[in-house]
Image: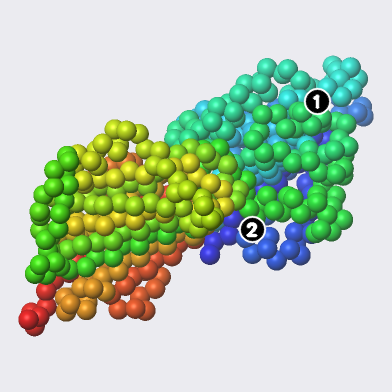
Amino acid sequence: MKKSLVIFVHGIQSTTACWDELKKLMDKDPAILAAFDREYFAYESKIGFGLFNIQQKLPDYGEIAKEFDTFVSEKFTSDYYELYLVGHSQGGLVLQEWLVRQLNAGRGRDLRRVRELIMLATPTLGSNLALGARKAVFSFLSNPQEARLRAFNTQAADTRRAIELQIMGATECNERNCPISIVAFWGTEDNIVQSASAEASFDVSIALPGDHHSILKPQDRDDPRYREVAQALLAPVGQRHVYEIDAYETYVRVAPLTGDQQSYTARRAGIAFTERSDNVARIERRVCFSPKNNCRDLFRLNYQTNPRGYLVASHDLQPRELGEPIPPNEAGADEITDFANSGTQFTYKFTPIPGRCHSQGLDIWNGFNGGGRDVHFHTGNNIRCRRYSFTVDLVPYLRAGWNLTDPQLFISPWDTGEHEIGEHRLQENRVPASDTSRPGMWIWNLENFRGGIVDAVWDVAPSVNRG
């Protein structure tokens, strides 16, 4: 499995040496070593006070962001799965600046692989400690970085608003928006960056023992200054519009029908019809949300069969506590009416419960006839799923003596919402089966699934010897 990359960015009047204590502990942490490679971005942030440094100019945030962009392009290659960003003090502001510049340049989709932004003692709302002395010193020493650290700085406020609207408030990645998990740490003894400035309006903030600099100096891996940061990397906090899912399972079983089995009752617009089908299918989906899921947006499980098909649906919460009611379907009245009128589609919407599983079952008649033996699901563009499992079960056809072609699974990484998805069956989107040990059954297991359109296609044909 691919590793992810973590890039660390230091603060003002500092160097990459500020990460040395964390680095030493991470070098001996098996979980961190297995999941990540690490890089340390350096930029000029120190200014001297000697005779020969009077005219020294430090780069402003725009220049640092450009340097960082080049650094990311060089280090974050296709060999990595996702990108994590960690900034201390001003380093967190530099990272915010880079993210906003990417969005404002219309490169929001490129940020989809940015998994998390971690900030340690970052003065998002500014720091006015010894402001008078700082102004006096830097009235003759050029330091555009220091100016951005002041409370009520206009440029800093613009960046902060963009983070709130285009990242924290984003529901999916597009040219100008991209939802990214953010966690802000602050020191309980920090007199340089107050807790209110570090926490700002971020959804998740965590206190660490220590002052502005000592929060980067944990003694061992049991020290909360290490444990909390490592945990944030290994189990990222949830974003308010991104579903954090531990496991997402989809099971599709199709069976042939013969003789009297082919007759079934369909109720359309309140009228019962006797119809016939040569196949019946069972589709089951189970979604288990992470305890760290912070998204409360309604999650949707829906399915639409062909116009001649008919389906019956059920849903449940698994496992339920004794006496716990089945969660209601929160779909709109018009969506529920669509099913009552046609019997060809069903939508189940619910508020996800962190640490719990939700499921949906569908029985479908006449849904997988000749020329239409395929199924696809729209999983959206705003999920982070640790394990995604997809099963196609054609064992009943095998037992009945039919010939089977191996199903193919395609995953288009962007869910466009289109239902005519044949053009998405590109070979680069094809995923090889993980398990074919049982004849007639194919299983795909994917790690770190990011959503999109999941599309399976197969075929069956009667055996020439089948009597």
Q: How many labels does the image show?
A: 2
Q: Mark 2 points at which residue?
A: 36
Q: Which amino acid does label 2 sit on?
A: Phe
Q: Mark 1 points at which residue?
A: 127
Tag of residue 347: none
In the image, what residue occupies the spot 43% across and 65% down? Answer: 445
Left or right: residue 322 versus residue 154 is left
Quarter of the rendering occupied by the C terminus: bottom left
Q: Are marks 1 and 2 in contact (CB under 8 Å)?
A: no
Q: Is residue 253 visible?
A: yes
Of 26 and 257, nearer the camera is 257
Question: Mark 1: few, some, or many residues within 10 Å (few <14, many ≥20)?
Answer: many
Query: Which residue is most to the front?
Result: 323
Q: Is residue 396 above or below residue 106?
A: below
The image shows residue 45 at horizontal and vertical percentages of 78, 34
Q: In this view, does 368 lie above or below 16?
A: below
Question: Mark 2: few, some, or many residues within 10 Å (few <14, many ≥20)?
Answer: many
Marks 1/2: CA distance? 32 Å
The image shows residue 429 at horizontal and vertical percentages of 35, 56
Left or right: residue 324 versus residue 137 is left
Query: What secondary structure is marked by label 1?
Result: loop
In the image, what residue occupies the spot 89% across and 17% down? Answer: 132
Label 1 vs 2, first from the N-terminus: 2
Q: What residue type is labelled 1?
A: Ser
Left or right: residue 107 versus residue 41 is left
Of 439 and 340, nearer the camera is 340
The image shows residue 302 at horizontal and vertical percentages of 33, 46
Q: In this view, does 123 lie above or below 230?
A: above
Query: Hey, which quadrant is residue 27 in on the image?
Result: bottom right
In the image, what residue occupies the spot 37% across and 38% down? Answer: 331
The image shows residue 251 at horizontal and vertical percentages of 35, 62
